[in-house]
């Protein structure tokens, strides 16, 4: 089955630690995205990548980092610099980087700082 | 600054009733308006989308109404069912952009 796989589903982090969220897609999509979802705030773009070895900051990139070494993979690292990391993180992909292409989302990773 | 404003925040509808969710936008350059449906613990999935060259698009029980002059669009769910209970997000973007601007979401509950 084609789709987007995020792992883990739940993640707990101690303050001061970096954690990496995994996102893999087998849809052969060029563009990949990371969104953060908080109650009452909708989805906000953290980073996006239109092509391998290239990525751009979104609206709330501070405290996050990404890499795009393979077309299929777009991991997100939540660093200790992110002051309020507890949230639901969603990875998405689309055929192209144009905003009008349908975005396919993964199941999400819920990160909790303990 | 919220590019897309969505209301209401939550909605309770009886089974068989009509659910209506409204969105408004400011950027007149937006030319693609999708609606996403999200079930608890899952990622959003595209439900239906419209472009501003039409005023209405219908797919089954779901209809988007679009008012370009008012910069508003809405989702109507006819004959609402308990299985429709989910959070609905409107979004807007423009061709060539690299981001979807999402509304804040509406949690719909359909009571049997």
Image (tube, rainbow, N blue to C red):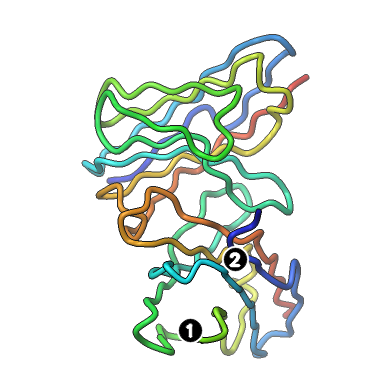
How far from the left and from the top, in percent, is residue A60? 58, 35
- Position of residue B103 in the picture relative to residue B53 (left or right): right
Q: Quadrant of the C terminus of chain B?
A: bottom right
Residue at the disc numbered 2: B88
Answer with the quarter of the image where residue B50 lies. Answer: bottom left
How far from the left and from the top, in percent, is residue B105? 65, 62
Q: CA distance from mark 1 to mark 2?
A: 21 Å
Q: Nearer the viewer, residue B11 or A45?
A: A45
Measured along the vertical axis of the image, is residue B100 above or below residue A60? below
Q: Residue furthest left?
A: A28
Tell us which disc is closer to us: 1 or 2.
1
Q: Residue at x 37, y 41 (%)?
A: A4
How far from the left and from the top, in percent, is residue A104? 38, 51
Q: Residue at x 57, y 34 (%)?
A: A109
Q: Residue furthest top?
A: A16
Q: Residue at x 32, y 24 (%)?
A: A68
Q: Chain of mark 2?
A: B
How far from the left and from the top, in percent, is residue A23? 41, 31
Answer with the quarter of the image where residue B30 lies. Answer: bottom left
Which numbered disc covers residue B100?
none
Q: Nearer the viewer, residue B48 or A7?
A: B48
Mark 2 secondary-structure assignment: strand
Q: Nearer the viewer, residue B73 or A107?
A: B73
- Position of residue A22 in the picture relative to residue A31 (left or right): right
Residue at the disc numbered 1: B68
Q: Residue at x 30, y 41 (%)?
A: A31
**Marks 1 and 2 belong to one chain:** yes
Q: Nearer the viewer, residue B79 or B93?
A: B93
Measured along the vertical axis of the image, is residue B91 above or below residue A88? below
Q: Chain of mark 1?
A: B
Answer with the quarter of the image where residue B72 lies. Answer: bottom right
Q: Are marks 1 and 2 in contact (CB under 8 Å)?
A: no
């Amino acid at each position: 089955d084609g789709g987007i796989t995020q792992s883990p589903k739940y993640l707990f982090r101690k303050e001061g630690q970096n954690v990496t969220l995994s996102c893999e897609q087998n849809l052969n999509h060029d563009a990949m995205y990371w969104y953060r979802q908080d109650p009452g705030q909708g989805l906000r773009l953290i980073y996006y990548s239109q092509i391998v070895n290239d990525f751009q900051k979104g609206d709330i990139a501070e405290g996050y980092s990404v890499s795009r070494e393979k077309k299929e993979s777009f991991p997100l690292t939540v660093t200790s610099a992110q002051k309020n990391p507890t949230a639901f993180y969603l990875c998405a992909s689309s055929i192209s980087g144009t905003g009008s292409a349908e975005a396919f989302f993964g199941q999400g990773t819920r990160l909790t700082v303990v | 600054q919220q590019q897309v404003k969505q209301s209401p925040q939550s909605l309770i509808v009886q089974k068989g009733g009509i659910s209506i969710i409204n969105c408004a936008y400011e950027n007149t350059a937006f030319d693609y308006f999708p609606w996403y449906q999200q079930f608890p613990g899952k990622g959003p999935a595209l439900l239906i989308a419209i472009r501003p060259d039409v005023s209405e698009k219908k797919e089954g029980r779901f209809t988007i109404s679009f008012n370009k002059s008012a910069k508003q669009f809405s989702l109507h769910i006819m004959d609402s069912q308990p299985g429709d209970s989910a959070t609905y997000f409107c979004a807007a973007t423009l061709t060539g952009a690299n981001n979807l601007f999402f509304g804040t979401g509406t949690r719909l509950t359909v009571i049997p």
